[in-house]
Amino acid sequence: MILSLIQTSQNRRKELIRFVESLNAQEGVFFSQLQLIFIDQEDNKSAFEKLNPAIKFTYVKTEHCSLSHARNLGLPLVEGKFVCFPDDDCWYEPDSIKKALGILQGGVYQGVSGKGMNENGVLTSIFPKTGAEITATKRCAAISYTMFYKYEKSICFDERMGIGSPYNLGAGEETDYMLSLMEKFNYKIVYEPELIVHHPTQNDVYEKAFLLKKFYSYSRGSGFLMQKHKFPWSYTILQYGRPFVGILVNLLRGNLFGSKKSYYMFKGKLEGLFFKIPNGT
């Protein structure tokens, strides 16, 4: 087995069918060398009825849980040399897996990050135009659904962080996973802009009030990540300076939503940086 894909969902059957169609359309790969591990938090099994039968389908039913916990349920089931974590609403280009495996099997890098893009070609984050090796402070907008790694069984996701976090640390678990591989096993990871994974942009899906809550939660996770990995203070100060300046600039421009967004990002990062996990958890 070459590649194991770990995916979870609560209730996105339509999006899962789209993902399956994109997986079936992969070119230049042997489907018998792929394993899809699906952690089902609702009743989505029928979405995989048309999955290429050559792909090994490993199905796990569970209760509603955090994203990190669901992925951790899947990690011990990995049979592939490499692993990736597609979101339930992402989908691949026909050559996405081929490009990722081409880099990983080259032996120079143990991880590769691609570029996120919605169906209209709009980037899902600020991705560099050219490829580069990823470092702790220059991560090239690496996000889990674009990441492919050499599998290391001793590394798992920090369940205190991520979507569904019991501490409202709504992000950072995927970066924590990557940094743990880099710090403990000297993984070299590269950003490759020609490797494209599609995903809706946030403005395509959510209303503004929900987005503000999401930015706040994600920023708390980002702040906690900086605390956990002890980033240089120069980097940390820069992370707080940007949203602080954003508050002022957007106010001057009359962009109230932009100013609120920057405020919640600043507030969340500050809280996360100094957040203490309660004793016994």
Image (spheres, rainbow, N blue to C red):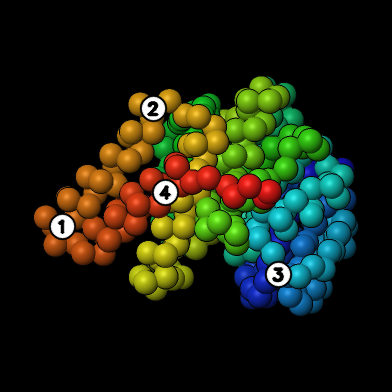
Answer with mark 4 or mark 2, whichever residue precedes in sequence.
2
Report which quarter residue 24 is drawn in: bottom right
Q: Nearer the viewer, mark 4 or mark 3?
A: 4
Answer with mark 4 or mark 3, whichever residue precedes in sequence.
3
Q: Position of residue 216 (x, y in %)?
A: 41, 58
Q: Position of residue 68 (x, y in %)?
A: 67, 53
Identify the residue position indicated by label 3 in the image.
64
Which label is found at residue 233? 2
Name the side, left or right, on which 115 lies relative to 176.
Answer: left
Q: How far apart, in angstroms, are the residues tagged by discs 1 and 2?
A: 27 Å
Kind of element beneath mark 1: helix
Answer with mark 3 or mark 1, whichever residue precedes in sequence.
3
Q: How far apart, in angstroms, are the residues tagged by discs 4 and 2?
A: 16 Å
Q: How far apart, in angstroms, are the residues tagged by discs 1 and 4?
A: 23 Å
Residues at discs 4 and 3 in contact (Cβ within 8 Å): no
Q: How far apart, in angstroms, are the residues tagged by discs 3 and 1?
A: 40 Å
Q: Amino acid at mark 3?
A: His
User: Residue at image x 33%, y 49%?
Assistant: 266
